[in-house]
Image: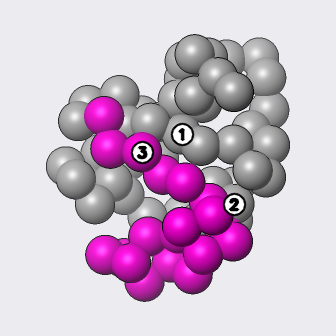
């Protein structure tokens, strides 16, 4: 895993995991709780988007290694 503050830029198809509750954002699935369409990369999420599992902000997410 590459944790928040990593040197690696998030890629469009990267899955990211919340560092607080471990909920996984998968761009292929989107986020039906917050109304995010499938195919939406993490970088394109609204600035005010937060984890649907615990309300953690985007900067608390980390890339899951492929």
SS state under label 2: loop
Q: Mark 3 Cα within 10 Å, few/some/many (few <14, many 20+)?
A: some
Q: Is residue 62 positioned above or below 44 on the image?
A: above
Image check: 39 left or right of 58?
Answer: right
Image check: 30 left or right of 24?
Answer: right
User: Label 1, label 3: how many angstroms apart (C-alpha)?
Assistant: 6 Å
Which label sits on residue 41? 2
Report if residue 33 lies within the magenta region: yes
x%, y% of residue 45?
59, 65
Image check: 11 left or right of 43?
Answer: right
Residue topped by disc 1: 16
Residue at (38, 78) in percent of width and height:
32
User: Label 1, label 2: how many angstroms apart (C-alpha)?
Assistant: 10 Å
Residue at (57, 16) in percent of width and height:
1
**Magenta segment, which residues?**
22-40
Q: Earlier in the sequence, mark 2 or mark 3?
A: 3
Q: Magenta part mainly helix, strand or loop?
A: loop
x%, y% of residue 42?
63, 55
Work out whether residue 46 can be spotted. Answer: no
User: Label 2, label 3: how many angstroms apart (C-alpha)?
Assistant: 13 Å
Q: Mark 1 Cα within 10 Å, few/some/many (few <14, many 20+)?
A: many
Residue 40, located in which quarter of the rendered image?
A: bottom right
Query: Between residues 24 and 55, which one lies in front from this camera angle?
Result: 24
Q: Is residue 66 positioned above or below 47 on the image?
A: above
SS state under label 1: strand
Residue topped by disc 3: 24
Q: Is residue 8 positioned above or below 28 on the image?
A: above
Residue at (37, 37) in percent of width and height:
18
Residue at (23, 36) in percent of width and height:
21
Residue 29, located in which quarter of the rendered image?
A: bottom right
Work out whether residue 39 can be spotted. Answer: yes
């Amino acid at each position: 895993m590459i944790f928040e503050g990593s040197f690696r830029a998030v890629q469009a198809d990267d899955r990211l995991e919340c560092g607080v509750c471990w909920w996984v954002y998968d761009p292929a699935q989107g986020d039906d709780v917050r109304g995010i369409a499938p195919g939406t990369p993490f970088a394109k999420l609204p600035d005010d988007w937060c984890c649907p599992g615990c309300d953690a902000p985007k900067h608390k997410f980390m890339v899951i290694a492929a």
